[in-house]
Amino acid sequence: MKPTKDRILAAAVQEFSQNGFGGARIERIAAAADANLRMLYHYFGNKEQLYLASLEAAYSHVREAEAKLRLDELAPEAGVTRLAEFTFDYFSGHPEFVGLLISENLVGGRHVQRSSLVPETAAPLIVSIESLLARGARAGVFRGGIDAVQFFITLHSLCYLHVANRHTLSSMLQRDLSDPTWLAERRAHVTEVLLRYLRA
């Protein structure tokens, strides 16, 4: 069994992602973690600190997984393809991360703004993207002058929207956006859009 602190944090990520900061209940987190409230407060202080710890854990998890992609070892187009496919799969496979992002944006990002860890975790990825784009430009396969932050936001937009808005888009378009065949088509589309944009 995981240590108590880890169980509490994992349960908190699920509770906050499903119910937001305002709707989440400390009692439900403690019960899901098979822990008592005293231990929850011992490790995390209060609900707000636990919520911030949940956000930081979620961001750290995705950044750690991105670091394992080893983009600097890949040819530029292969690197962009790997990053695009990873990002697409991560959002599709981690609804708790999407839920936390939605929840935090609904409150204007007021909790994540207090974190020094979140921007620190993003910095290495932006550097890797800058290197990838620069290598592609030097090799003549990518256009020059593409901003890494703009690319990062475009990448996330393409991989995130259909997950965050799955229910409304599925209803409006009368198409199941969770269908594996549709998702495979969307994944290929995202990669093609990014590569066509980058190519010289």
Image (tube, helix red, strand yellow):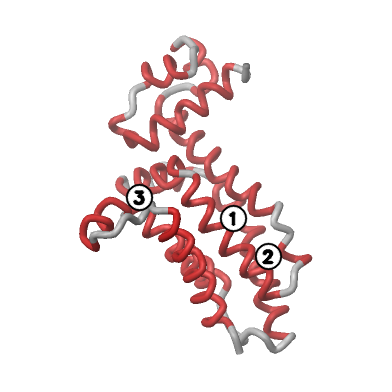
Apparent side of residue 136 relative to residue 114 in the rendered image (left or right)? right
Circle 2 sits in a helix, a strand or a loop, which is it? helix
Q: Nearer the viewer, residue 82 or 33?
A: 82
Q: Earlier in the sequence, mark 2 or mark 1?
A: 1
Rendered image: mark on residue 182 = none
Rendered image: mark on residue 122 = 1
Q: Which of 164 and 100 is in front in this view?
A: 164
Residue drawn where x is 54% and y is 45% of the image? 59
Residue drawn where x is 48% and y is 51% of the image? 91
Q: Nearer the viewer, residue 5 or 62?
A: 62
Q: Earlier in the sequence, mark 1 or mark 3?
A: 3
Q: Name the residue under label 3.
A: 105
Image position of 114 with respect to 131: above or below: above
* Mark 3 nearby-residue class (10 Å; few <14, some 14–19, many ≥20): few
Query: Looking at the picture, how far across and down is residue 95, in whole percent?
Result: 43, 43
Residue sticking out furthest to the right: 73
